[in-house]
Image (cartoon, helix red, strand yellow):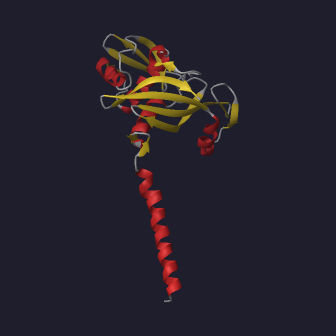
Amino acid sequence: MNKKKVIIIFLSLIIVAFLIYVFFIKENEPIQLENQTVKHETVESLYKTAKADNCTEFTTYNKKTDVNEITTNSILYLIFNQMKQDKVLKDNIELKEYQISASKIFQTSIWPKEFKNYMYDGYSYSLNGDTITREKGTCDSLQYVSKLYGYSSKDETLEVDVAVAYIKDNKIYDLQNNEIGDYDKKNINKILDKGTIQVYNYVFKNDNYYLNSIGSK
């Protein structure tokens, strides 16, 4: 084998090794942003708390709004998304389970102490005393969809961007009611790039990310 062929083979091996590193190793490393390392799994978990549910009313915020000023429906929406992650949604839920899930999102006890007929994921939930009960309900005509659009971190803060839209009559609209495409399950992620970008701002305290405000881009 001549010297030229040896050099070509050697360079080819280097390129293959580099591609393996990029696609299989580098992809799974935590992303270093500013002065803080944020694991992608952490962001995914926060996104699951903020994601739109296809059978639950979604409130949009056009300007940055502190958690103390967001609507009761938004507070319940976030808590129930967390409860879904915590696998505690059932016909009878203890008050303590609700409080534990809520305390993972909010630093202070801003969650409702009582509510009635809150619709989430096809069920109607009511909190009375020490128990949340649920009954099968009817979904709204609008179906919401979302995806994790991006995130960035600086010091003790984290911004998570979520692209949101809704489906009606096989058309997809952003939250300002502008049509952005025909519903296509295979291409929904691409269509959501035109959706409304809701911004969730978190602060890192006591080894946990707490929601600080919600806004939009």
Q: In which quarter of the image is the C terminus?
A: top right
- Horizontally, residue 73 falls left or right of residue 203, namely right
Name the quadrant containing residue 171.
Answer: top right
Q: How many labels does the image show?
A: 0
Q: What residue is drawn where x is 62% and y is 33%?
A: 195
Q: Position of residue 97 (x, y in %)?
A: 31, 23
Who's the residue at 40% across and 39% down the image?
Answer: 35
* Residue 84, visible in the rendered structure: yes
* Residue 136 seen in the current view: no
| 204 is higher (above) or lower (below) than 193 | above
Q: Which of 163 and 93 is in front in this view?
A: 163
Q: Where is residue 76 in the image (x, y as percent from the top left)?
A: 44, 19
Q: Residue at x 33, y 15 (%)?
A: 131
Above or below 183: residue 131: above
Name, please, the residue furthest toward the bottom.
1
Q: Please tell me which residue lies in front, 183 or 1.
A: 1
Determine whether 91 is above or below 186 in the image: above
Q: Which of 38 and 188 is in front in this view?
A: 38
Residue 67 point in image, percent of width and height: 45, 18
Across and down, in percent, residue 103 comes to 34, 22
